[in-house]
Structures are given as structure tokens and as C-alpha cells.
Amino acid sequence: MTELLDVLRTLFTDPFGLIDLPIRQWITDAIGWIVSNFRGFFRTYVSPPVRGVMELSQWALRTLPPGVMLIAVFVIAWRAASWKVGLFSAVAFAFIGFMGVWDALIVTLSLVITAVLFSVVIGLPLGIISSRSDLFYTIIRPILDIMQTTPPFVYLVPAVMLFSIGNVPGLIATIIFAMPPIIRLTNLGIRQVQTQYIEAALAFGSSPREILWKVQLPLAMPTVMAGLNQTIMLSLSMVVIAAIIGAGGLGLEVYAGLERLNIGQAFVGGIGIVLLAMVLDRITQGLGERGPGGRNGKAD
Amino acid sequence: MIRVEDISKIFGADPETALGRLREGGTKAGIQAETGQIVGIDRASFALDPGEVFCIMGLSGSGKSTLIRCINRIIEPTAGRILFMDPELGEQDVTAMDGEQLRRLRTYHMSMVFQHFALFPHRTVHANAVFGLEIQGRDKAERDRVGAQVLEMVGLGAWGKAYPSELSGGMQQRVGLARALATQAKVLLMDEPFSALDPLIKVNMQQELVRIQQELERTILFITHDLDEAMRIGDRIAIMEEGRIVQIGTPEEILVNPRTDYVANFVEHADPTAVITAGTIAVPFSEATFILHEERAGLRYYRRRDDGEDGDIRYCIDADGRFHHVVLGERAVEPGRMDTTAPAATGASVRGRNEEVLRCGPATVLRDVLRARVRSRHPVVVTGEDDRFEGIIDEPALVHAILEKRGQPTTEPPVSGDAREAHA
Ligand SMILES: Nc1ncnc2c1ncn2[C@@H]1O[C@H](COP(=O)(O)OP(=O)(O)O)[C@@H](O)[C@H]1O
Ligand SMILES: [Mg+2]
């Protein structure tokens, strides 16, 4: 009888003492297992393409004379959004250059481009599959939730363990962190296409593939673009954090500035990041509004 | 062209049970309350002849959209058979087709027009019109040619580069029609194509469709909830109630002889003048209504029984039963053929009407008879094949036709639902 009372009392005073979940140990073991068994695989098969794309884009951006690049930024932003956005983008880039961190901008931009490219190449097909298979989406959804809600710092440790330090582990962590929105919104965009359009496509004999390419994807475009926008923003924020594990660019300016208590350097890096974020945001938003389905996706 | 045999559609998890209930005589509402399943269509059967415009009519929720979608299997029927007959392909069982055969059927032989147009908003008008041709795999030159041709046909030749959102509702549906015509499919499935349009535009589109149909002779299954529309363009009409087809007939048959109260309610407010024909409303030439007045020189002179001895119109028929002429008082008059294209003489007073006697065929619609009667003060003579005298249309017959929407009281009265139950 007294034993029962004891247990009851502990239930209220110290319930967590009753059970000890060794999650910490499990995860450590799991990561350790992955690292010891797959490190070779990751370093031989995952690193090189990521590094290759990053180096290629960095080389291309560096080779372009800054003046030409400013004009290119203006034209891209103008075509994607409006001449106002074009002007703003060119001025913002020039300002970053005048602050003396042009090279850091190039590095960050190439990291973002690489991370977004991989996120889209992997995320878009996963989004399409999700939209066609409820089972697949049910399985993938909790994984996406975990990927998105895990604090970005948490990715850094296993990334370092697998790829050591530098740009590549930063990129891998970024790709994982930034991919969920493009998957989610591609899935959502396709599922939201009204049945009347699917019926019309079916009635004229379209195959599932024709329906996807001629009807669903074009009509889902504004939503997919919103996903792309989020992916770009997330990858930019992650690329900055990745400076902790040795990624370069504007994030490194901030990180190094903080470490040396050089507030000026940190702020220059910070301003550069904010301006870059605004430019990328305006451009992708412009793309979304201009997307073919955006014309009149809601026509009854 | 198409034969639909006992098609049923149950929306629900356990259609077999619901089908069983239907066979036992269960109603849609009863089955829904009992099994939670919805009866979309309850054993519908009908056949479309080549070149025919067949209308399906019914209240909202009666299963029209479900039925038309079963025919190209955008909705999978639960039971029954659909046959597609084609001079080239022979008879094909649509319900037994696999995915590939079905796609071919939809690509080449059936096309569809939707109530809310369902134009692809990301495609231009031209790209919408040639969508089916793209699926057929036609090259660009041919798509451009046929696209321009069909857009021209629906009066949108100049709009190819516009987007659907830049067009009015009526114009959008013209694009929908062009898209369906472009594939050269012989069967056109149209689900309330004009219901979303303003009344004036709607009438306009109906005339357009009739014109195009005369030119192209497609077989059209046309759904509507508007009886006047069905009567205007349908060769035959099927009326649906709660998933069931309750009556099939020509517009006139349905108007004159509605089989149930539901149908009678539908036709109550219909405009009879475009549907009811002279043959139906005429006082028929028979023993009961006419009497031989005299026989002279091989010709027989009849007068209306009701007119009595002093009736001053006599109808003269020759030995072969052909209509010959009319005698007004002492004067013989050769009846003139009705000119149905002449405008109604709106200003004519009763006294201003002339002495001519008019004659028409049994298929002439009531509207044209009325128009002619404004000019002439005498009954209209109805003659059939070989000039056979079929009867006359006098004023009481006209009034009766308009008010009662049916022929002479001597024709069989319609069987109402109540009456049937009373008999049973
Ligand atoms: N996908 C569906 N699931 C369940 N019930 C449906 C579905 N589609 C139609 N129905 C039901 O079937 C009946 C017929 O609908 P419908 O064919 O759209 O009628 P109509 O076109 O004549 O207005 C209605 O009772 C409707 O609620
Ligand atoms: Mg409907």
C-alpha cells in the first residue's frame, strides 16, 4: 500500500525520473553509424557534384566584369519584375561593391545559386510525386516538418562530421534546410488545379503526362514560384549561418567581424546580406506574378 | 451513333448494395438515408442517332452532368453498357475499353464543351482552340490552319492571340466550342454550355450552334435545364428526374403529352408556339367534325358540323381525297401557301384582315400559323402528303393550343402521375 502511494507521489513530484529516454545516445549512435559507414560514399558521390556546381558558378560570376554584372542584374530583374526592381537591384549590388565586399557577395551568390539549384532539381520531382501519391506525401510530410523545424545549427554538426569543414558541408546543410518549401508548394500548387481543367484535358484525350506538363504544372506555376522564393530566402539565411563551419562570403564577414569584435565589418556583411535578400525576393516574386498561370488562375 | 444501356452511377463505398436497392425499387433519397450512398444515375438508357441533337433536361442535381461524363468515362459508370457506333470503327463497347483505347476515343471521336468553359487560362485563345489537335499530334502548320478555321467559324477570327480572361463569357464559350469542333470528332458532348450566359447572348449562341450544326452535322448530346433551349435546338429531349430518365420524345411529344407531373411542371411555362405543329392542333378532318354538304361534278363539298346548315365555308375534295379548293359563300378560292417569312402584320385590325385562305403543312409550327392568321380572317387549311386534307385550324383551336399546350380535346389526354396511381 505504501509502495503504491510512493509511486503515486513520484508521479506528481518527479514524473521524469521514472523513465529515462536515451534519445541523446541514440542519435549520437545513429550519426556515428552513418558517419563511419557512409562517409566514404558521401565524400565520393555527394561532394564532387555540389562542389563542382559551386565552383563553376563562382568562376562564372568572377569572370564577368562587375560592370557587366550590374547591367545583367538590371536586365534580369527588369524582365522578371519591373524596371523599378531592375534599377533597385543594380543600385543595391553597386552599393555592396562600394562597401568593399564585392568578392564576398560573389561567393554568397554562388553558394545560394548552387543550393537553390540542387533544392529545385531534387525538390520539384519530389513535389510532383507528392501531388500524385497520397501515400508518398503522407510519408514525406513528417520528414519535411522535421527538416524545416529543426534549428539550422543542428544540421551543421553531422554535416561537418560527414564532409569536414568548408563550403560543401555548408551547402549540404543549406540544401536540406531550404528544400521543403519547394516540395510542399509544388505539391500544393498541383493539387490546387481545379478539376474543371483536368476534366477538359481528359475529355480531349490527354495522357497523365500531358495533363502534368500542359495543364497542372503551368497552372501551378505561381505557387511553385512562391515555393522557390521561400527556398531562396531560406538558403540565403542558411548560407550565412554556414560561415560557422567554414563557408565563405558575406556570412563570413559577419562571423569574422563578431569574433574580432569588429562591429563595422560585421555590419557591412549584414547590410550586404539584407540587400541581397531584398533583390532575390523582388526578382522571384516578380517571376511568380508573371508566371503563365498567374494571368488568370482563378477564372471560374 | 451512341447507345446507352442501363447505365447507373453510385457515389459511395459499396455500390453493389445500392444497386440492389435500386432494382428492388428503392428511391434516391431512401438509398441515401439507408446506405449513405448517392445515386447519380439510375439505369438510364437511350440512343443517339447520327446527326441528331439530343437534349437531356432536368433540375439541378438530377444527374445530367454525371450522365454525360459517363459517356466518355471521365466518370466511371457503376453498371451498364455504352456502345459507340461508327461507320469506320464498327460497334465498340466504350465501357470495356482500356486506357489507351479510351484516350483514342476521346482524342478522335468525342469532344466536350463545359458549362464554365474550362478554357486553359495560361493558353491563348488559339492555343486553347488547338489543344485537341496537339493531343492528336498534328504539326504546327496544320494546327495553325485548323485553329484559324474554327475560330473564324465561331466568329473569333481576330482573337487568336488574346487570353481567355480578356474575353466576355459568350466569347469564351465560342472558344470552348471551337476547341471541341477543331478535333473533327463526330460526337459533341455539351454540358449546359450556355447556362452561364446572359439571356440575349444565350439565344445568339443557340442560333449559332444550330447554324454550325446544319453545316457540320455532328451528333450532339446537349444538356440543359432550360426547356425553351431544349425545344429550340433539340431533335429529341430526354427528361431526367433523380437520376432516372422519365420521358424521351420530340419537343412536341413532350409538350403535348407529358408523361408525369414532374414533366408537366417542366413544360407548363414553355413557349408552345415554336414547338406545337399545325398537325397537332388542327380540327381533324373526320366524321365527328365534318359533314358532307354536297357532291357535284366528282367533287365533294364538306362543311364543319358545328357551323350548322348556314355555314358559309365549304372545303372541296376530289375523288382521290386531294384537297381542291375552298368555297366562301358563292366564291371559290384557291388557298395560298403560307409565307412564313413575312413579318406579322402588327397593325391589322380584325376588320382589316383579308379574305384570302391560307394553307400549310402539318409540320408548320404554331408561331407561323398565328402569324398568318393575323392577315387572314378564315381558318387555315392543313394538308399533308399528296395534298391530303388533314383538317383546319380555326380560332378556338388556336386559343386551345396556346392555353392548354396541346391539341384538340379529342386527342388522348395525358396520363398524370395522380391518375396512374389512382388506377394502380
Ligand atoms: N463526386 C461526387 N460524389 C458524390 N456525389 C456526387 C458527385 N458528383 C455528383 N454527385 C451527386 O450526384 C447527383 C447528380 O449530380 P449532377 O450530375 O452534377 O447533377 P446535374 O448536372 O443534373 O445538376 C447529385 O445528387 C450530386 O450531389
Ligand atoms: Mg450539371
Image (tube, rainbow, N blue to C red):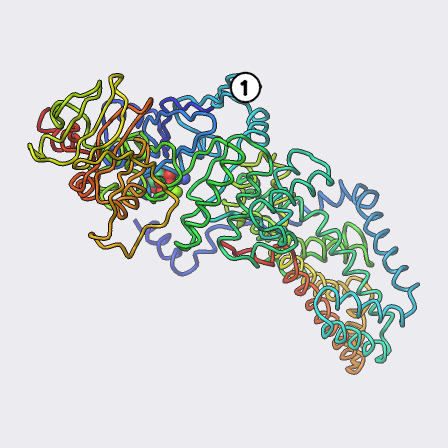
Write down the residue under mark 1. Answer: B87
Position of B260 compared to B55: left or right?
Answer: left
The image quadrant where one finds the C terminus of chain B is top left
- Give the residue at x 36% y 34%: B12
Mark 1 secondary-structure assignment: loop
The foreground one among A269 and B162 is B162
Q: Which residue: 27% across, 17% down?
A: B320
Residue flagged by tag 1: what amino acid is it?
A: Pro
> Residue B238, how many percent across, how many down?
33, 32
Q: Is residue B326 visible?
A: yes
Q: Position of residue B104 (x, y in %)?
A: 59, 27
Q: Quadrant of ligand 2?
A: top left
Q: Chain of mark 1?
A: B
Out of A67 and A24, give the one closest to the viewer. A67
Q: Quadrant of residue B46?
A: top left
Residue at 89% x, 69% y is A68
Q: Is residue B258 visible?
A: no
Where residue B26 sits: x, y (%)?
A: 23, 28
Q: Residue B60 sits in which quadrant?
A: top left
Residue B225, relative to residue A177: is it above or below?
above
Left or right, A61 with respect to B348, comes to right
The location of residue A134, given as percent across then percent down, is 53, 40
| Above/below status of A175 relative to B115 | below
Q: Nearer the viewer, residue A2 or B391?
A: B391
